[in-house]
Image (cartoon, helix red, strand yellow):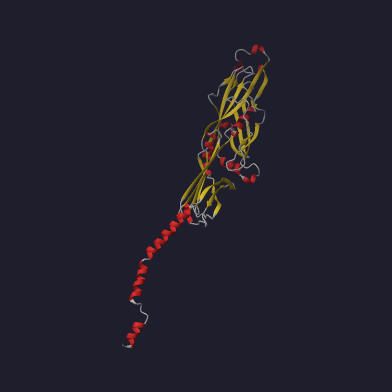
Amino acid sequence: MSEAGSADRGGGTAPDGDGSRLASLVATWPRRIGVALGGLVGLLVVLYLVGIIGAPAAGLEDRGDWGEVTDERTEVVTTVWVDNPNPIGVSLGNTVTAEYDIVLNDVLLAEGSKSDIEVPKDNSTEQLRTDVINDRLADWWVAFVRANETVHVDANATLQVNTLFSASHDVHRNRTMLNESTPVVDALSASVNETSGTYTESVSASEVGEDVLGDDPLGGSDSVTVGYEVQRGWATWGDVSESETTVRFHLLVHNPGDVPVPASPDGLGVSVDMNDVRTFEAESGDLSAESLGPDAVIAPGETREVTYRVTMDNGQVDDWFTSHVRADRGPGVEATAVTAQFQVVFENPATGGQFRLPGESPVGYDCSFRTAILVDGQNSSSTCEPPTVSGN
């Protein structure tokens, strides 16, 4: 046998038997891997059934707190809790997501979502941050007024875990506040009721024209009593839209004098400041008397309820809401100080002058109210009280 032939036989070339065994081993890899994976899945199922591993549970830790509040933005911080019973944490990118929203009076005011949430072992919390949608505050104000100043809060959160054992957790919390008070319209009612009183003056009969006295100049009396008595006053809401709010001011007016007096006033001034934000303001040009013509009068001895409709711009609602929830104002967060002022002016038919009800300056009424939309451990309350006899 040649040396070359010997080299070929002993040079390390795999015998045919070894090659067959290797090919057979490679051919069984998919089956072996499938068996291994099946065993792993089976083990996980067994561990799940005996409670060693399981799908994370979740809930709402805090329906929300006010975060950063500036003139430009109002941040809401919602906190969810997650309990991961597995021996290791879950960090699976967007397979763990959270969605949440805050709804006031059926108006979606804040919403957001977050993915890439890491879920460590055991119990943990996650903060979800978003901003109030300022453009919707006007919609909320409309709903707030139409609900008679009652605030309904709904906080909702959903946590979706898409792992081997997927789970979805929905949490809803709601509460109602100020359902036993109407602080804004109460403040307006109290301010207009402060005009209650008698406003008369005695005028020489010789100064009063025959068109006022008529054919009977009071039996020759030298003087004539002219004026008004406001027995009580109150306010009610009228129409409200995103841009305007209508308030009806009611006065029960008696004529204690000797001559008819105008039922329609020459002017009216009303303003409402909420945390020093001028939310509503109206002057004479915004005034209209319901069901009264410009020549309507109140006869001597007559008592008449007159209603004045005032339409006011509510474009400052977002500024007020920001001031209401600012945490940097110290104790009393979600608190509003209300100052309402009212004055009505009537013409004196005898002299051509004016009766200002009251006096030379408007009457004011101060009160406050607070809510607990997102503030824990605080109850809604109001010191704004309507007149004892509202007449409505």
Residue 329 showing in the rendered view: yes
In the image, residue 389 sits, relative to residue 90, either above or below, namely above
In the image, residue 84 sits, relative to residue 268, either above or below, namely below
Quadrant (top left, top right, bottom left, bottom right) of the C terminus: top right
* Residue at point 35%, 70% (across, down): 23
**In the figure, is residue 298 to the left or right of 160?**
right
Front position in the image: 334 or 244: 334
Residue 99, image x and y in percent?
49, 48
Outermost residue on the left side: it is 1
Residue 65, image x and y in percent?
58, 46
Location of residue 10 by image quarter: bottom left
Front position in the image: 302 or 149: 149
Front position in the image: 216 or 282: 282
Outermost residue on the top side: it is 219
Front position in the image: 291 or 191: 191
Location of residue 269 by image quarter: top right
Outermost residue on the bottom side: it is 2
Residue 245, image x and y in percent?
54, 34
In the image, residue 107 sits, relative to residue 86, either above or below, namely above
Residue 347 showing in the rendered view: no
Quadrant (top left, top right, bottom left, bottom right) of the N terminus: bottom left
Residue 229, image x and y in percent?
64, 22
